[in-house]
Image (cartoon, rainbow, N blue to C red):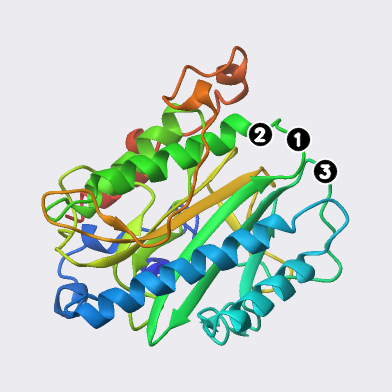
Amino acid sequence: MVTDQLSLYKKIYKASSPPINFFIPYYFLKPTPYYIIAHMIIRSQSDLQNIIKGGQITKKVLNKALSVIKPGITTMQIEDTVVNELKANNAQASFKGVNAGEGPYPYSCCVSVNHQLVHTLPSDAVVIKSGDLVTVDLGVKYKGLHTDTAYTVEVETKKQEYFLSVGKKALKQAVKTAVAGVKIGDISAIFQKIVEDAGFNVSIDLVGHGIGHKLHEPPQVPCFGQKGRGETLQENMLVAFEIMYMQGEPYLALGDDGFSFDTKDKSLSAQFENTILVQKNKEPLIIIWLSFNLPPSHLELQAMPRGRHDLWSHKPNFLNSKYYSYYLQKT
């Protein structure tokens, strides 16, 4: 999800401002209209049963899509697999028809490869190769309720195993922390710390989001933030947490298809997303049960391999940047 505050910031910032794709999460601005918008709260047993069933279907569709990824297939063939699996489970695609990019999104899923971070259109012209990083992002609408998920895999090789394990670790830790009463900034800070400590960058343009009767609802959940800041997670709130990150600079460019957001420097990127139901005094109900399969050596983040710190010595630290100082002045 792209923050809807971006157009506002383009008007605020002048020639000496940060890049136009930089955004400030809504909860750092005052006043904010989001406090008067209702969040999706599961209030009935029937809604709970339907969202759990929808999550089971979403997992099945995603796993089927991931299972067909191999060298030689096109990203459109992955789309075809998603369409067929949705039909087999009497469910609808959440993404199809959503206003994004250059118009309504025309497909059931997004299939992004390597430097394509999110929202990439499936294509007959894009053929998967060994060593590619492939992200499948999809949503399922079942009996009026949406679920949303994304997962990145490396095709055949294991050269990017550490890079992918970082995102899995960040999402896993964020989900574990998400109990009623926790602030959105607490979740965002977990994403940022784990990813930046590993030598990579989180996206500063894209956010997770509330979900429910609509695909995108409040609250927004950025990939960076401060502990103790932002809205408070409520019991039975339905939220899609997603970590989006890259090996290079955190700036994006619109792709040739008019929908895709690509890393501006063409560095590799990844995305992991899960839909959760926030609980009181216990870990959330994970609506889409994903197996992260972390390699044993990466169950706990370890020091970067020798040489990586030198490779990423140019990496900006957002917390120490002028952009961070700028939005703190607005609170």
Query: Mark 1 highlights which residue?
Result: 157
Nearer to us: label 2 or label 1: 1
Question: Is the residue under label 1 in contact with that under label 3 (CB below 8 Å)?
Answer: yes
The amino acid on which the numbered mark 2 sits, given as a three-letter code, is Gln
* Residue sticking out furthest to the top: 306
Say which of 215 and 202 sits in front. Answer: 215
Look at the picture and state if 122 lies above or below 163.
below
How far apart marks 2 and 1 lie (CA) works out to: 8 Å
Q: Which mark is residue 130?
A: 3
| Label 3 element class | loop
**Circle nearer the N terminus (3, 1):** 3
Horizontal side of 42 relative to 102 (left or right) equals left
User: Measuring 37% from the left and 66% from the top, which residue is drawn there?
Assistant: 9
Question: Is the residue under label 1 in contact with that under label 2 (CB below 8 Å)?
Answer: yes
Horizontal side of 40 relative to 244 (left or right) equals left
Q: x, y (%) of residue 328?
A: 22, 48
User: Measuring 40% from the left and 45% from the top, which residue is drawn there?
Assistant: 171
Horizontal side of 20 relative to 42 (left or right) equals right
Q: Residues within 10 Å of mark 3 (few under 14, many from 20)?
A: few
Query: Mark 2 highlights which residue?
Result: 160
Which quarter of the image is occupied by the C terminus? bottom left
Say which of 319 and 140 sits in front. Answer: 140
| Quadrant of the image occupied by residue 37 | bottom left
The amino acid on which the numbered mark 1 sits, given as a three-letter code, is Thr
Q: Residues within 10 Å of mark 1 (few under 14, many from 20)?
A: few
Which quarter of the image is occupied by the N terminus? bottom left
| Label 2 element class | loop
| Label 1 element class | loop
The amino acid on which the numbered mark 3 sits, given as a three-letter code, is Ser
Q: x, y (%) of residue 274?
A: 42, 57
| Quadrant of the image occupied by residue 257 | bottom right
Q: x, y (%) of residue 323?
A: 36, 46
